[in-house]
Image (cartoon, rainbow, N blue to C red):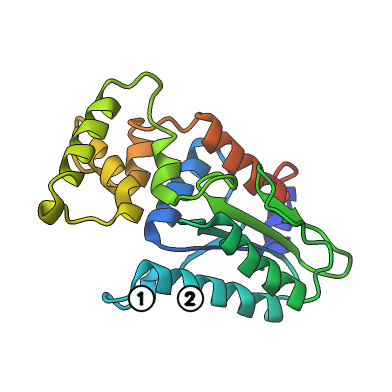
Amino acid sequence: MGKRDVRKEESQNDLLLVEGKNDQHVILSLLVHYHIPDLFKIRPLDGISNLNETLEMRKGRLIDSFEVQLTTIVEGKLGIIVDADTDLSARWASLNHILKSSGYNSVPENPGPAGTIIRQEKKPVIGIWLMPDNTIPGMLEDFVGFLRPQNDLLWPMVDEAVLKVKTLEEERRFRDVHESKARIHTWLAWQKEPGKPMGQAITARYLDADAPHALKLITWIRDLFDLESA
């Protein structure tokens, strides 16, 4: 059995929980760009979601799933990527409580700016990434916005367009919390092939997979799943 086969067998229980298909596809596109082998599973939660389910309900299900996995995992490593949304501290507090209730006694008071990895003797390794970058409120779309090319001339025009829509009051159809979604999808609508999903936009190089935020996320994934030795 070769080194890669042994590593794959060892990592069969390694799991990364994400909120939805968009998160999954963005991460998969980055993994391909960085030549990361598929030595862990990525499980999105929206594959079975109700169409009427709010994003906060979905996040609740993701965190519930994380809690369930903590009680059942015996071997392997477990990661979760979840949006911080409007209150990063509250999101971290909920995860912190779950970890401490599951017997993890070395949980940091605040999330690490480069992502959090918790290693405790006789416990599975746990990783937590709060979108967009563990330090500010936001979501996947904020993270993807950080991958736009430097000095991009369209982004200021997107800002102007979104701000103008926000002044229309009754005609504005998105909530403030979803402003980053409006921005990135407006920007994607103005590319050579308009409207590509975010993961495909990385593959098409509209977005920069070598941007610092992307590299930081990939470094966290490599460290969490011990992929340097894969």
Quadrant of the rendered structure where residue 88 is?
bottom right
Q: What residue is pinned by disc 1? A: 49
Quadrant of the rendered structure where residue 167 is?
top left
Disc 1 vs disc 2: Cβ atoms closer than 8 Å?
A: yes
State the CA–CA distance, disc 1 to disc 2. Answer: 9 Å
- Quadrant that contains the N terminus: bottom right
Q: Is residue 54 above or below residue 195?
A: below
Q: Position of residue 58 (x, y in %)?
A: 42, 71
Is residue 178 visible in the rendered structure shown here?
A: yes
First-in-chain label (1 vs 2): 1
Mark 1 or mark 2, whichever is nearer to me: 2
50 or 27, which is in the foreground? 50
Describe residue 195's horizontal placement relative to residue 87 as left or right: left
Name the residue at 67% across, 57% down.
127
Q: What residue is pinned by disc 2? A: 61
Say which amino acid is labelled 1.
Ser
Callout 1 environment at 10 Å: few (<14), some (14 to 19), or many (20+)? few
Callout 2 environment at 10 Å: few (<14), some (14 to 19), or many (20+)? some
176 or 107, which is in the foreground? 176
- Label 1 sits on a secondary structure element that is loop
Name the residue at 52% across, 37% down.
214
Is residue 45 visible in the rendered structure shown here?
A: no
Name the residue at 37% across, 37% down.
203
